Each structure stands twice: as C-alpha cells, then as structure tokens.
Amino acid sequence: MTRDLPVERSARLGLWLLYWTPAVPPEQLEPLLSDHLRYMVDLEARGVLFASGPLAATDGSRTGAGLTVLRAADEAHARALADEEPFAKNGLRSYTLQRWTLIEGSLTVSLRLSDSSLTFVESGSQ
C-alpha cells in the first residue's frame, strides 16, 4: 500500500528528458560549442532549462552525447526547443524525447544572503 509512503506527497515535477546522440565525432561539435552554450544559458534564463550537460564514457572520455531536462508545456514545446539547439539544428546531433515525472531525490542548496551566492551542497555516499 503506497498511501503510507512519503512519495505520495512528492512534488511530481513534470519534465521532458532529451537524450542527445551525436551524428559526428565529439571534436566536430567544437565549432558550434559556444553557440550551443549560449542557447542553453538562454533557456536557463527563461526558466525552461532544469538541467543539462554532457555524458562521458565510463573512462571519462568525451562522447558527444548529452542529457537535457526541460520544463516544457507539452511535447510540441519540448520538440521546438530541441530542434533549435545549434548541434541539432545543424544535423550534428539527434535526440530522443521522453516525458519524465521527477518523484524521488534530494537537493541541498546554501544561499548566502550577504553576497547572494548560491551553492549546491554535495553529500558523501552513504
């Protein structure tokens, strides 16, 4: 019976997951990297980007793949945002889109009012 579990009171954030798959070797993404970063920072400033970053191979080497989590109104909105991402727009990466409901997890943030600094607090593995 799940009614007794805390997850029943979870925030249940409705998000969209983009798994980016490269069509070219990672070094061929470099010329558009600054355009890509500007686009992602713009999405962040607009409140649409929840999280994003590159995925690496298990040895830490670059793959050109990535993962992006969007706060989009619906699938069409998420696809429109993905289609405008510079790597995708130029045929250097494709994506798989999935609806994701964030239910479990935690995030600790420290806000220092004196200097307006925000820090994500890392916790050790337990």
Image (spheres, rainbow, N blue to C red):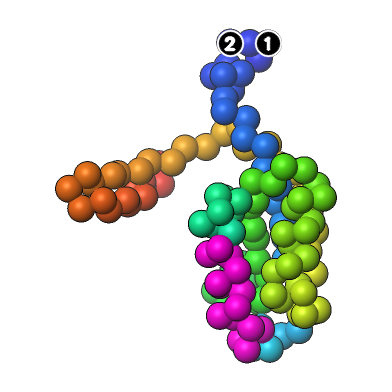
Whether residue 93 is visible here, answered yes or no, is no
Looking at the picture, does residue 52 appear above or below residue 100?
below
Would you say 115 lies left or right of 103 here? Answer: left
Q: Amino acid at mark 2?
A: Asp
Q: Where residue 4 is drawn, which disc sits there?
A: 2
Q: Amino acid at mark 1?
A: Met
Q: Residue at x 53, y 64 (%)?
A: 41
Residue 117: x and y in percent read 27, 53
Label 2 Cα neighbours within 10 Å, binned few <14 / some 14-19 / many ≥20: few
| Quadrant holding the C terminus | top left
Q: Secondary structure beneath disc 1?
A: loop
Question: Which sits in the foreground, 50 or 108?
Answer: 50
Q: Residue at x 20, y 53 (%)?
A: 115
Magenta part of the protein: which range? 29-42
Q: Where residue 1 is drawn, which disc sits there?
A: 1
Estimate the spatial distance between the alpha carbons at disc 1 and disc 2, rounded to whole Å: 7 Å
